Amino acid sequence: MNHSPTSTSANAIDMEPGDMAMQLRQRSLLFWLHASTRACPAKILIPDSRPVLGTFIATDAQEHRVRIDTLQTPLGTYEHVVLRGSDIDAIELSHVPTIWNDRSV
């Protein structure tokens, strides 16, 4: 079955599991691509710690490393950091990238 990357979720019932996994991966990559096109103020939730604030810059394709600028921690502010993805419980972006306003993606 051939599905374009812009297929809507209505077609999800007809998809093969591999096709659905590929489409979900494409959506994830598109989300991070659009999030990295502008600096997004973010709250980063780290296990066993208070949330820290910073500016989301980018992540690698495997989401193993996350680039944050102006990270405000209890120990001070760090201008540029790279956090391990495994050290992050969640990232809350202050705005949703515009791609999610388009339901065709």
Image (cartoon, helix red, strand yellow):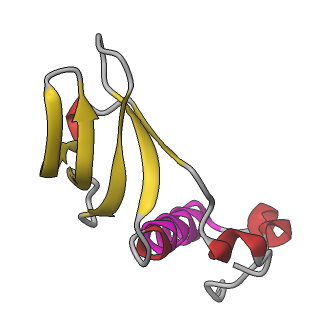
Classify residue 86 by image quadrant: top left
Is residue 56 shown above or below 22? above
Residue at point 47% right, 68% down? 35
Nearer-the-camera pick, 52 or 3: 52
**Boundaries of the magenta span:** 16-32
Does residue 25 show up magenta in the picture? yes
In the displayed structure, does residue 17 sit left or right of residue 39?
Answer: right
Residue at point 61% right, 84% down? 5
Residue at point 23% right, 64% down? 60
Classify residue 63 by image quadrant: bottom left
Nearer-the-camera pick, 96 or 69: 69
Q: Position of residue 69 (x, y in %)?
A: 24, 55
Nearer-the-camera pick, 3 or 100: 100
Does residue 24 show up magenta in the picture? yes
Q: How many marks?
A: 0
In the displayed structure, does residue 83 sit left or right of residue 26?
Answer: left
Classify residue 13 by image quadrant: bottom right
Q: Position of residue 57 (x, y in %)?
A: 31, 64
Figure quadrant of the C terminus: bottom right
Main secondary structure of the magenta stretch? helix
Q: Which residue is most to the front?
A: 76
Q: Which residue is most to the right?
A: 10
Is residue 57 shown above or below 66? below
Q: Position of residue 97 (x, y in %)?
A: 59, 68
Is residue 16 shown above or below 34? above
